[in-house]
């Protein structure tokens, strides 16, 4: 922010015409003042973000001059000519309003000229040493978030509350110990390079070097996996047993709209912002903005609640460079975001158990378990302790409680479900929160049984986490299995190629094609290695890609019309007919989505994919 202070014996202004489309409405077209301290004010980029720290300094400086010159009136005069780095009109108006309120709160006779208008002015300056002063306010790195004091506890399934420093961890509570040491005591955990990141790259998850930091590219194998998880997340959302509506929308929202701006303020300095002719836009960091903007226009009856709204939202968070982790902490990712509208807090609490059960069920399918952080407001923790204990009892292990001051967020409880990865680091995957504030902020209403409009309570949840984090959890489990001497695998439904057909020579191509066509007709992702390579090389390549089923066709198979199948998960090699193979694979795919392969079915027609490294199989 920049200011120019003029102590004027006389000052007059008159509005002429709009300078910007979003100019303030005129309450008066002119002003005339005597013995006035005129504060010509330019609001710059970043001032709105730094408002809490800027405002006291600006007000104190101006009031110091105001009192010394013994002015009778103070006039805030918007003036865009002191800087070339201007804030958006919407932000500037907010800052100027706040400035005016701050002076009025200090007992000053203050006026403000309208923002966004060309104005003619004339003045007669006193000419004493304090009559002309300029100031520049340029705070250093300032976050939208004010430092918030947190209290930490460990809460057991029996309802016992411990301070973390007093808790004695049991032998089977290693995951909880790691979480507490990291979150509470800020202990630097052992690092190192995990094979997980090589595995991510092997499947085509890679940083995009020609983009901003934290942005990934998805090669063909990775694309198949992302598409499969995208559809699976929709199946999971529908499995909650309530009506769920799927939507799609934009990823940019204008900060001039109050609900968007207020919601963004709570998110802090991890926002991506974009300049546009319509003002300053924020890139969404979840599906909240788009879903809430739609839902506010719907007519909703209490009879239709609970109601779910779902979108796989491309989301943007400006994570710090040093925090970025391939496949996990990204600046752009895909969030399968479900919002459930409920009548009131009691119904939301009751429904949250169904959400948590589903979260635990899904991670259990991966052979993993969670430890949880329960972020709660202080008043909610005191008045709903039994509910939190019941949640913890449902997960079957103590939880880390983080207590926040009441009323600073839109939620009363926000649960983070954590895995401990192969590097012994806590990684949040799934989450849910109970939101009591955004319905009013976005004017989302339902009509109750008495015909009265009410604001619903909203559960936000990513049952399987973001798409990338869900895949991270699966690949990390495979790496941990490998470290224990097991063959690393991924679920067949997620494998980019589920069955590879390998003929020993061209003499068996006709039967190999017949097998391939049957597999493809059953929507099994299959391909055929028709390259002129040795069998050992072909089998090794299939192993590099962790293909669940490898079918080898030689002379015996050609004559018997059976196939020799190598099953990766068990290490078993088995002869079966084609229908038995199809039935075996189909059984593994029950309850999971079928998405098409992103590659031609014949390996000879593919380019050499650089991400398929010669890694251990």
Image: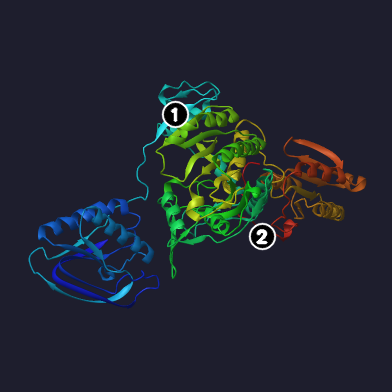
**Residue 367 at x, y percent in the picture:** 65, 34
- Looking at the picture, tell me which residue is in the foreground, 76 or 549: 76
Which image quarter holds the N terminus?
Answer: bottom left
- Asked whether the viewer can see residue 291, the reply is yes
- Residue 152 position (above or below residue 500): above
Return the residue found at the far front: 450
Q: Where is residue 541 shown, x and y percent of the image?
A: 69, 47
**Outermost residue toward the left in this view:** 128
Which is more toward the observer, 608 or 306?
Answer: 306
Label 1 Cα neighbours within 10 Å, binned few <14 / some 14-19 / many ≥20: many
Position of residue 214 in the picture relative to residue 561 (left or right): left
Q: Residues within 10 Å of mark 2 (few under 14, many from 20)?
A: few
Q: Position of residue 337 (x, y in %)?
A: 58, 49
100 on left or right of 331:
left
Q: Which residue is mark 1?
A: 153
Badge number at residue 29: none
Disc 2 to disc 1, C-alpha distance = 55 Å
- Residue 501: horizontal and vertical position, in percent? 79, 49
Of residues 57 and 215, the one drawn nearer to the viewer in this rendering = 57
Residue at the spot 35% in from the left edge and 45% down from the top edge: 146
Q: Quadrant of the C terminus?
A: top right
Does dot 1 land on a helix, a strand or a loop? strand
Using the rendered view, name the quadrant where residue 76 is placed: bottom left
**Which circle marks residue 607 in the picture?**
2
């Amino acid at each position: 922010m920049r200011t120019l202070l003029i102590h004027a014996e006389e000052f007059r202004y008159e509005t002429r015409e709009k300078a910007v489309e979003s100019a303030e409405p005129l309450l008066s077209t002119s002003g005339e003042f005597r013995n006035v301290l005129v504060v010509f004010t330019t609001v710059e980029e970043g001032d709105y973000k730094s408002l809490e720290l800027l405002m006291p300094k600006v007000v104190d400086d101006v009031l110091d001059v105001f009192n010394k010159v013994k002015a009778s009136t103070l006039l805030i005069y918007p003036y865009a000519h002191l800087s070339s780095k201007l804030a958006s009109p919407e932000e500037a108006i907010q800052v100027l309003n706040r400035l005016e309120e701050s002076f009025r709160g200090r007992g000053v006779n203050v006026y403000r000229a309208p923002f966004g208008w060309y104005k003619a002015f004339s003045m007669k300056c006193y000419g004493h040493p304090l009559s002309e002063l300029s100031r520049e306010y340029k705070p250093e790195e300032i976050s939208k978030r004010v430092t918030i004091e947190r209290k930490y506890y460990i809460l057991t399934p029996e309802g016992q509350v411990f301070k973390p420093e007093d808790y004695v961890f049991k032998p089977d509570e290693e995951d909880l110990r790691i979480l507490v040491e990291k979150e509470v005591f800020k202990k630097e955990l052992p690092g190192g390079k995990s094979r997980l990141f090589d595995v991510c790259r092997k499947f085509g998850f890679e940083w995009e070097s020609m983009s901003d930091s934290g942005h990934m590219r998805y090669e063909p194998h990775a694309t198949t996996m992302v598409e499969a998880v995208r559809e699976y997340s929709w199946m999971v959302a529908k499995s909650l047993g309530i009506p769920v509506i799927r939507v799609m929308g934009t990823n940019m929202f204008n900060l001039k709209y109050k609900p968007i701006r207020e919601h963004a303020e709570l998110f802090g300095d991890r926002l991506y912002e974009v300049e546009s002719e319509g003002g300053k836009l924020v890139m969404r960091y979840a599906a909240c903005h788009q879903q809430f903007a739609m839902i506010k226009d719907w007519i909703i009856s209490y009879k239709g609640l609970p109601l779910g709204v779902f979108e796989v939202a491309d989301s943007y968070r400006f994570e710090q460079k040093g925090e970025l982790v391939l496949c996990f902490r990204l600046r752009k990712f895909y969030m399968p975001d479900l919002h459930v509208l409920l009548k009131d807090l009691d119904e939301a609490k009751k429904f949250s158990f169904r959400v948590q059960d589903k979260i635990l069920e899904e991670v259990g399918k991966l052979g993993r378990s969670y430890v949880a952080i329960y972020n709660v407001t202080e008043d909610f923790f005191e008045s709903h302790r039994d509910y939190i204990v019941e949640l913890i009892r449902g997960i079957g292990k103590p939880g880390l409680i983080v207590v926040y001051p009441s009323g600073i967020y839109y939620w009363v409880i926000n649960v983070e479900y954590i895995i401990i990865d192969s590097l012994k680091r806590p990684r949040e995957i799934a989450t849910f929160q109970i939101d009591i504030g955004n319905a009013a902020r976005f004017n989302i209403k339902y009509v109750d049984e008495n015909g009265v409009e009410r604001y619903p309570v909203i559960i936000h949840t990513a049952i399987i986490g973001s798409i990338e984090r869900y895949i991270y959890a699966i690949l990390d489990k495979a790496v941990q299995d490998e470290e224990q001497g097991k063959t690393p695998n991924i679920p067949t439904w997620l494998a980019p190629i589920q069955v590879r057909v390998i003929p020993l020579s061209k003499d068996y191509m006709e039967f190999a094609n017949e097998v391939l066509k049957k597999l493809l007709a059953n929507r099994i992702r299959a391909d055929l290695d028709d390259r002129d390579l040795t069998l050992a090389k072909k089998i090794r390549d299939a192993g590099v890609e962790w293909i669940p089923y490898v079918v080898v066709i030689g002379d015996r198979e050609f004559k018997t019309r059976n196939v020799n199948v190598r099953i990766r998960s068990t290490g078993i090699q088995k002869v079966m007919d084609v229908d038995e193979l199809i039935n075996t694979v189909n059984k593994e795919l029950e309850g999971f989505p079928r998405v098409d392969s992103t590659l031609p079915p014949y390996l000879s027609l593919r380019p050499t994919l650089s991400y398929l490294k010669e890694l251990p199989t």
